[in-house]
Image (spheres, grey):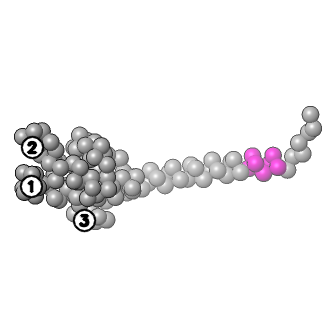
Amino acid sequence: MTKAKSDGLLRVGDLSARTGVSARLLRYYENQGILPAQRSSTKQRLFENSAIQQVLYIRELLAAGLPIRIIRDLMDCVHEPGRLDPCTVPVLVEHLNEYDARIASLVTTRASLQGLVDASAATPVAAH
């Protein structure tokens, strides 16, 4: 049994297998400061068992459209998937408003494009 296993720590490959997130992404999360890791004497990344849940939080926040820089700020406020401290509400509302603005812009763009399609379909095409 390796020291990492006996100490209850997970190597990056073990964490990857337990979360379904690639080792490359886990190393990226660590480099971005959202997933803490220790180092073994041979410089291998070692993660606490709690990192499993933390990776799931990160994936949930990413799926909600939050960028890594915002997730880094929110990580101390995450307690379980889907539940954040109330102090995160202003940040989440800001991002929600940004998405609403993007959606409104896309709806306008779509309506304009549909208008062009409708106008083109109503106009006979001249033979060349």
Residue 96 in picture, x, y percent from top left:
42, 56
Residue 15 in picture, x, y percent from top left:
23, 54
* Residue type beneath disc 2: Ser
> Image quadrant for the N terminus?
bottom left
Mark toward the start of the polypeptide (3 vs 1): 1
Q: Which mark is residue 40?
A: 2
The number of callouts visible is 3
Q: Secondary structure at mark 2?
A: loop
Q: Is residue 71 magenta?
A: no
Residue ID for mark 3: 80
* Residue type beneath disc 3: Glu
Question: Which residue shows up at 16% across the image and 53% down it?
Answer: 10
Residue ID for mark 1: 1
Taking the image as shown, residue 40 lies to the left or right of residue 64, namely: left
At label 1, counting other C-alpha atoms closer than 10 Å, the crowd grade (few under 14, some 14-19, many 20 or more) is few
Q: Is residue 116 magenta?
A: yes
**Which range is magenta?**
115-121
Comparing labels 2 and 1, the label whose residue is closer to the camera: 1
* Residue type beneath disc 1: Met
Taking the image as shown, residue 4 lies to the left or right of residue 25, namely: left
Residue 40 in picture, x, y percent from top left:
9, 43
At label 2, counting other C-alpha atoms closer than 10 Å, the crowd grade (few under 14, some 14-19, many 20 or more) is few
